[in-house]
Image (spheres, rainbow, N blue to C red):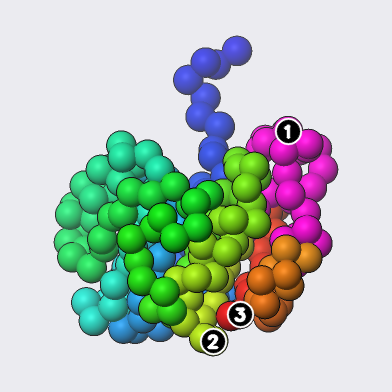
Amino acid sequence: MDNNKRIPGGNELLNPADLIKNKLGVFYGAKAADLGCGGAGYFALEAAQVVGPEGIVYAVDILKSALSNVETRAQLLGLKNIRSIWSNLEKFGATNINNDVLDFALLINILFQNKNQLEILKEAARMLKKGGKLLVIDWQVGRFPIGPKPEDKISPEKIVEMARTINLTVEQQFEAGQFHYGVVLIK
């Protein structure tokens, strides 16, 4: 067995450019936040390129090492519009972003990892302006050769149900690659 064989992580199985531009509709000059950006920052970095120098992207994570990695990658790419923010998304109001300021927020492969999923959705919604959009991408329910255990996954129906309790409406649901689904919610 080849121990050096790399198994791709969830965000490597997704197409950030397509999801950010075509599914979410991020535009030049927008304010966006990648909530739980991870160390690779795939989505934060892609969003920073789309919003351009007139926009801003907040890379938010609970791991300071992840934020440091994203900052380094942003510098290497010449992106000056990324701001890293350390936060626990499970605590409402903890993220150092004002209420009602974001055009877009992203929760990519985050909800399955956390127990307080509703609190995370509330925190994302708090930062979105009226009409702002939240993209949730998570693992499809079922057994697959990669990804989290089936009992750790969250169904799109559960996300929609939680979103409705906090007055978010569903714009669209879709397959986001071979192992993921996506839901776009509007505040």
- Secondary structure beneath label 3: strand
Which residue is disc 2 drawn over?
A: 131
Q: Rounded to the nearest whole Å, what is the CA distance between mark 2 and mark 1?
A: 34 Å
Label 1 or label 3, whichever comes before in sequence order: 1
Which residue is disc 3 drawn over?
A: 186
What amino acid does circle 2 point to?
A: Gly
Which residue is disc 1 drawn over?
A: 149
Label 2 or label 1, whichever comes before in sequence order: 2
Q: Quadrant of the N terminus?
A: top right
How crowded pointer 2 is (Cα within 10 Å; few <14, some 14-19, many 20+) is rated as: some
- The single residue placed furthest to the bottom in the displayed view is 131
Mark 1 or mark 3, which is nearer to you?
3
Label 2 or label 3, whichever comes before in sequence order: 2
Does residue 179 show up magenta in the picture? no
What amino acid does circle 1 point to?
A: Lys
Q: Rounded to the nearest whole Å, what is the CA distance between mark 2 and mark 3?
A: 6 Å
Q: Image point 69% across, 68% down: which residue? A: 163
Look at the picture and state if 31 lies above or below 40.
Answer: below
What amino acid does circle 3 point to?
A: Ile
Residue 21, position as x, y percentages in the image: 48, 76
Q: Rounded to the nearest whole Å, what is the CA distance between mark 1 and mark 3?
A: 29 Å
